[in-house]
Image (tube, grey):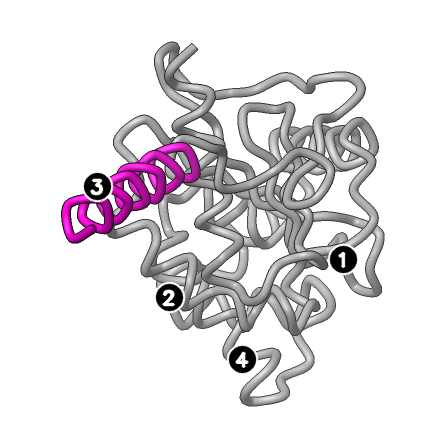
Amino acid sequence: MLRMVSALLMSLGLMMSATVVAQEGQPQYKEGVHYRVLDNPGTTSVPSGKVEVREFFSYMCPHCYSLEPTVDGWLKNKPEAAAYVRTPVLFMQHAEPLARAYFIEESQGLIGEIHRPLFDAIHMHRERLFDADALAGFFEKYGVERDKFNSLYGSFAVSTKVREADALTREYQIRGVPSLVVAGKYAVMRDNLKNNAEMFDVVDFLVKKESEK
């Protein structure tokens, strides 16, 4: 009798182990629940061998602002294959002046110095940085002279970047921010996730999925 019980317990243990292995082998995140596949993949702009992770955002968006600490933490430990890029959207109020400001930061290599402070100025300090004059004053604090800012603000290069950002936003059918798109083809479904951290868990999953192809 004891031998039969032992055999039964062993059999149950093996079944449970097999179940655990099967569950671990299943995808953690599912298409249509945690991410969607875009009908028409977009153009990516990262080196070969890298997987683009693109954030669509606006400096006016409080949810984008609240995502920033999570972005910063993820960037410090991101998958080696991931290449992170940002695209400002133009469909929010005051969006175009702030999109131009972002591309000026980018052109001057000042994203690390200005990106987060500009968010803080708008959402924490309630500064009305919604036109070229106000933004020029803000950029002066970071060593960008007003004349240089004004020249860059209306430049062909920055205007082209703004048009490209708007075209990409339309191409990916982005209707809300923040939105994360991986490899130009997978859009993270933010509304179905528990918190900001889980957004990047899905990103990691998709980067791994894409890099293993």
Q: Which residue carries the number 2 mark? A: 142
Spatial separation of the CA atoms under disc 1 and disc 2: 21 Å
Determine the secondary structure under disc 2: loop
Determine the secondary structure under disc 3: helix
Residue placed furthest toward the bottom: 125
Mark number, residue 121: 4
Callout 2 touching callout 4 (CB < 8 Å):
no
Spatial separation of the CA atoms under disc 4 and disc 1: 15 Å
Q: Name the front one of labels 1 and 3.
A: 3
Find residue 15 and report its horizontal and vertical position in percent. Answer: 35, 38
The answer to whether residue 107 is above or below residue 211 is below
Mark 2 / mark 4, whichever is N-terminal: 4
What stretch of residues is rendered in magenta?
Answer: 1-23
Does residue 207 appear to the left or right of 169 in the view shown? left
Q: Nearer the viewer, residue 118 or 203?
A: 203
Find residue 125 and report its horizontal and vertical position in percent. Answer: 55, 89
Q: Name the front one of labels 2 and 4.
A: 4
Q: Which residue carries the number 3 mark? A: 7
Mark 1 / mark 3, whichever is N-terminal: 3
Seen at 42% across and 63% down, the residue is 70
The answer to whether residue 111 is above or below residue 134 is above
